[in-house]
Image (spheres, grey):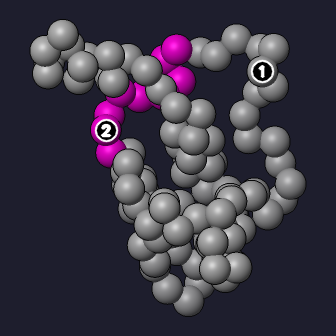
Amino acid sequence: MNYEDVEQIRDIQFRVHDVFLNKCRKEHTSLEIVTSSGEIIEGIIDCYDKDTIIVHNEMAQMMIFKHSISYISPRSGKQMIKPENSKWDDNYVKKERYLCAAR
C-alpha cells in the first residue's frame, strides 16, 4: 500500500467528531467546551481542522487545540447526531480537509 492509497482511505473514512463539529458549525450552535484543565469556554464554531477549533463569543475569537479539550456539549441540550441504529448519510460530511464557515 502506497502513500496515495492511504490518503484515499483517509478521505473516504469519516470520524464522528467531524460530523458533530460540522453540524454544530452549520447550525451556529452555542457550545460549552470544557478543557482538560477544567476551564469552560462558551462559543460558536467558526471553523476547525484536525488539530484546532476556532470559536467566537461576544468577547473574543479563540483558537482551541483539540488535544486540550475534555468534552464539548451544546448549551441547549440539543441532540446533534443521530443514534447509532440510524443510517449515516455518506454525503453528510464533506470531503474537505478543513471546514470553515464563511463570515
Coordinates of residue 96 in the picture (x, y in percent) = 32, 34
- Image height check: is 92 above or below 96? above
Coordinates of residue 20 in the picture (x, y in percent) = 62, 41
- Image height check: is 59 above or below 75? below
| Position of residue 97 in the picture relative to residue 26 (left or right) | left
* Residue 54 can be seen in this image: no
| Position of residue 52 in the picture relative to residue 74 (left or right) | left
- Image height check: is 62 above or below 47? below
Coordinates of residue 89 in the picture (x, y in percent) = 59, 15
Dot 1 or dot 2, earlier in sequence: 1
Tell me the amino acid under the disc marked 1. Glu
Which range of residues does the magenta coloring cover?
90-98
Q: Secondary structure at mark 2?
A: loop
Coordinates of residue 60 in the picture (x, y in percent) = 49, 85
* Residue 13 can be seen in this image: yes
Q: Which residue is mark 1?
A: 84
**What residue is drawn where x is 63% and y is 72%?**
36
Viewer-proximal residue among 28 and 22: 22
**What residue is drawn where x is 46% and y is 77%?**
62
Q: Which numbered dot is residue 97? A: 2
CA–CA distance between discs 1 and 2? 24 Å
Tell me the amino acid under the disc marked 2. Arg
Q: Residues within 10 Å of mark 2 (few under 14, many from 20)?
A: few
